[in-house]
Image (cartoon, rainbow, N blue to C red):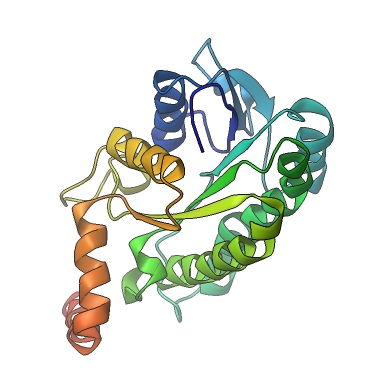
């Protein structure tokens, strides 16, 4: 799909990676970009069209699809939350429910609502922002990992279901992105701009899966060549911080 001249909708577009997606789309020649946010007043890019959009709200999603954004031919599902909860800790059930509601059900809700819109507008594409933890589990952040495993299944299934209508579904994987979500972590981070640009390149080339940074490449290879070693590393990390 050609980005130039497209009409796009980005969820979670007011900051971080969502903001980078909006900027990258305009740089690539998009004719219109809807910037979805829970508070549309927080969208600072004057070129974008702010849209009130909380992906956990069926009413917001329905209005976006049927009223506000009916000309969309590219959907970028970027909205997400991470609560950094181990699986068996107090309040982990609440954390898992919240992460699933945004990262899984919110994404599924957007795909279901906008699939008919994309079909009417020639097919287009959907890009779903996943994570390297779609492929493995870090026990320190286990509920988030579970949500991203499920989100990957939603994305893969949508690709198969929507192929016949000409809608291409791209899954995007990255490690630590330099946004507020992991701002406090002392780790090497990837720029949001790089992730956004690699996503758009994947859309252009009809890639099914985009590894958007070096960590994605590293984890992908580790899960294919020596998954037991990767699991052992995660066990050691958990044992170390639990002492």
Residue at 76% in and 34% down: 64
Q: Residue furthest bottom?
A: 228
Q: Relative to residue 205, is residue 89 depicted above or below?
A: below
Q: Relative to residue 3, is residue 111 depicted above or below?
A: below
Query: Across the whole image, how many numbered discs are drawn on residues?
Result: 0
Q: Between 159 and 111, which is closer to the camera in this rendering?
A: 159
Q: In the drawing, does residue 182 fall left or right of residue 53?
A: left
Residue at 73% in and 28% down: 71
| Residue 180 x, y percent position in the rendering | 36, 40
Query: Is there any visible trace of residue 148 in the rendered image?
Result: yes
Q: In the drawing, does residue 20 fall left or right of residue 160?
A: left
Q: In the drawing, does residue 29 fall left or right of residue 184?
A: right
Hey, which quadrant is residue 234 in on the image?
bottom left
| Residue 203 x, y percent position in the rendering | 46, 43
**Quarter that holds the C terminus:** bottom left
Query: Is there any visible trace of residue 242 in the rendered image?
Result: no
Hey, which quadrant is residue 136 in on the image?
bottom left
Q: Relative to residue 202, is residue 132 depicted above or below?
A: below
Q: Between 76 and 115, which is closer to the camera in this rendering?
A: 115
| Residue 32 x, y percent position in the rendering | 59, 19
Q: Between 58 and 218, which is closer to the camera in this rendering?
A: 218
Residue at 41% in and 38% down: 200
Residue at 68% in and 64% down: 161
| Residue 228 x, y percent position in the rendering | 22, 89
């Amino acid at each position: 799909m050609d980005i130039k001249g497209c009409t796009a909708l980005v969820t979670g577009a007011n900051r971080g990676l969502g903001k980078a997606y909006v900027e990258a789309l305009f740089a690539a020649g998009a004719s219109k970009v809807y910037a979805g946010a829970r508070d549309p007043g927080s969208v600072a890019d004057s070129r974008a069209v702010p849209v009130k959009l909380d992906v956990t709200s069926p009413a917001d999603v329905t209005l976006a699809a049927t009223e506000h954004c009916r000309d969309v031919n590219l959907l970028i599902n970027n909205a997400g939350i991470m609560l950094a909860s181990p699986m068996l800790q107090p309040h982990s059930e609440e954390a898992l429910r919240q992460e699933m509601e945004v990262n899984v059900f919110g994404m599924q809700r957007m795909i279901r609502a906008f699939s008919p819109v994309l079909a009417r507008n020639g097919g287009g594409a959907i890009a779903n922002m996943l994570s390297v933890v779609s492929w493995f589990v870090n026990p320190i952040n286990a509920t988030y990992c579970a949500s991203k495993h499920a989100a990957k299944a939603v994305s893969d299934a949508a690709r198969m279901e929507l192929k016949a209508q000409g809608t291409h579904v791209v899954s995007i994987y990255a490690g630590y992105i330099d946004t507020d979500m992991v701002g406090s972590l002392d780790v090497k981070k990837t720029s949001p701009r790089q992730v956004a640009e690699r996503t758009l390149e994947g859309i252009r080339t009809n890639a099914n899966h985009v590894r958007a940074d070096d960590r994605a490449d590293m984890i992908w290879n580790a899960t294919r060549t020596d998954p037991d070693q990767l699991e052992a590393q995660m066990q050691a990390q958990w044992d170390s911080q639990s002492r």
